[in-house]
Image (spheres, rainbow, N blue to C red):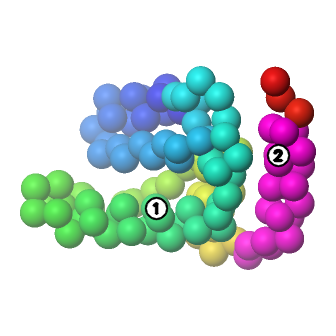
Amino acid sequence: MAWLAETLASNGYIVAAVNNHGNTAAEPSYQLHGFMLWWERARDISVLIYKLVADPQSGAHIDRSRIGVAGFSLGGYTALAMVGEEVHRRVGTDALKFFDRTLQREP
């Protein structure tokens, strides 16, 4: 989603782009561990925001009333979870079983 980050940054927004190791287009292939604990991603982003706001250098430039979040696929889920969407872990467990079977078949 570099296109979105670059557009926002070039228009004066502060952007923190997150890649989840094992589940990012920045790496050559997906890994099973990249899909584990997906329900904790909203908390991870909350911690990131808190640290950026608390940082003496970056925090002074952040308007706390105008913080947003966006994402695609699991990142989209994370964005929804950040604004209060209910998490259903069973769906994620089923997805992990699928990815586990799929990755085990790869050469």
Q: Nearer the viewer, residue 91 or 60?
A: 91
- Give the total of numbered labels: 2
Q: Secondary structure at mark 1?
A: helix
Residue position for label 2? 99
Q: Is residue 76 visible?
A: no
Q: Would you place residue 71 above or below residue 88 in this image?
A: above
Magenta part of the chain: 86-104
- Identify the residue at horizontal 42%, vertical 43% (top origin): 17
Dominant SS type (magenta): helix
Is 71 part of what is drawn in magenta?
no
Where 50 falls versus 16 (above or below)?
A: below
- Position of the C terminus, as image quadrant, is top right
| Label located before the other in sequence (2 or 1) | 1
Q: Residue at x 83, y 29 (%)?
A: 106
Q: Is residue 68 left or right of residue 103?
A: left
Of badges 2 and 1, nearer the viewer stands 2
Q: Mark 1 — residue?
A: 45
Q: Is residue 5 visible?
A: yes
Q: Amino acid at mark 2?
A: Phe
